[in-house]
Image: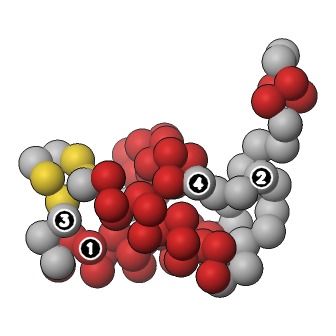
Amino acid sequence: SNEGAKGLKAVWTDKDNEALVSVLRIQKDAGNQAGNGWKPSVWTIAAAKLLADGSKNGSEKTSSKCSDHWTNVSQYQW
């Protein structure tokens, strides 16, 4: 595994997931869901929310990590 070379992996807690879902619900109501995807600004907003909430587990949850995480978990959890 070359995961070590990439540095820390983002670790998602239930609180982090709830914050992400909260942002997505607000952004959906605001019309920022495009087709079956999300506008790029949504992930920037989500990353800022997680940072503001003090999400500190693993590496920083960037906009691209938020998007990837949602792709991975949305089919199973929501």
Q: Where is mark 3, residue-wise?
A: 32
Q: Where is mark 4, residue-wise?
A: 62
The image position of residue 50, as x and y in percent, is 60, 73
Q: Quadrant of residue 78?
A: bottom left
Q: Is residue 16 left or right of residue 41?
A: right
- As measured in the structure, the alpha-carbon distance from the residue carrying label 4 to the one carrying label 1 is 17 Å
For marks 2 and 3, the one nearer the N-term is 3
Q: Which mark is residue 42?
A: none
Is 14 drawn above or below residue 5 in the view shown?
Answer: below
- Look at the numbered discs 3 and 1 and tell me whether their residues touch, using CB distance below 8 Å: yes
For marks 4 and 1, the one nearer the N-term is 1
Q: Residues within 10 Å of mark 4 (few under 14, many from 20)?
A: some
Q: Secondary structure at mark 2?
A: loop
- As measured in the structure, the alpha-carbon distance from the residue carrying label 3 to the one carrying label 4 is 18 Å
Q: Where is mark 2, residue-wise?
A: 59
The image position of residue 48, as x and y in percent, is 54, 72
